[in-house]
Image (spheres, grey):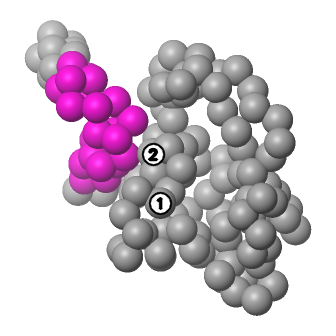
Amino acid sequence: MEESQEHDPARWFEDDEVEDPDYPSGRAVCTTVVNDTCVFLDSKRRCVLHMAESESPALKPFYCRAYPVAIVQGRVTLDTEWCPEETQCCATVADGELSGLDVYAGELLHLLGDAGDREMRHLIAQRQTSG
């Protein structure tokens, strides 16, 4: 972390735990917002947890690992509202060679698990052949 970032782990997450049926545990705790951004983003808007994960696997919280894929009201969706406009880091490329399934394969697998990922791909394949 940079010197200007919060180094006290007790201040990395909000105190309030909220009920959220879309999370595996049924509850969620948000990361703290500092200077209008996530406590884990450095001055170049890079996630320090993402960078540290090569040496400390499984460091990122569930939501961060799945981002920008999310479950909202029971539906799988892309949560790109937090993506910086100047980079569009989380958006697929219009007319690109890869589908959203390809681009977000790791995130979808993390979010849905093996069985859920297989089921989703099966449903999409059925829809494509019948439509």
Q: Residue at label 2?
A: 66
**Residue drawn 81% across the image and 60% down it:** 11
**Residue drawn 28% across the image and 32% down it:** 113
Q: Position of residue 20 (x, y in %)?
A: 65, 22
Q: Is residue 63 above or below residue 8?
A: above
Kind of residue at badge 2: Ala
**Residue drawn 37% across the image and 63% down it:** 57
Q: Position of residue 51 (x, y in %)?
A: 47, 76
- Which residue extends farthest right? 35
Q: Quadrant of the C terminus?
A: top left
Q: Residue at label 1?
A: 59
Circle 2 SS class: helix
Q: Is residue 127 above or below residue 97?
A: above
In the picture, measured across the screen, residue 128 lies left or right of residue 30, that is left
Q: Quadrant of the N terminus?
A: bottom right
Q: Nearer the viewer, residue 127 or 45?
A: 45
The span picked out in magenta is 98-121
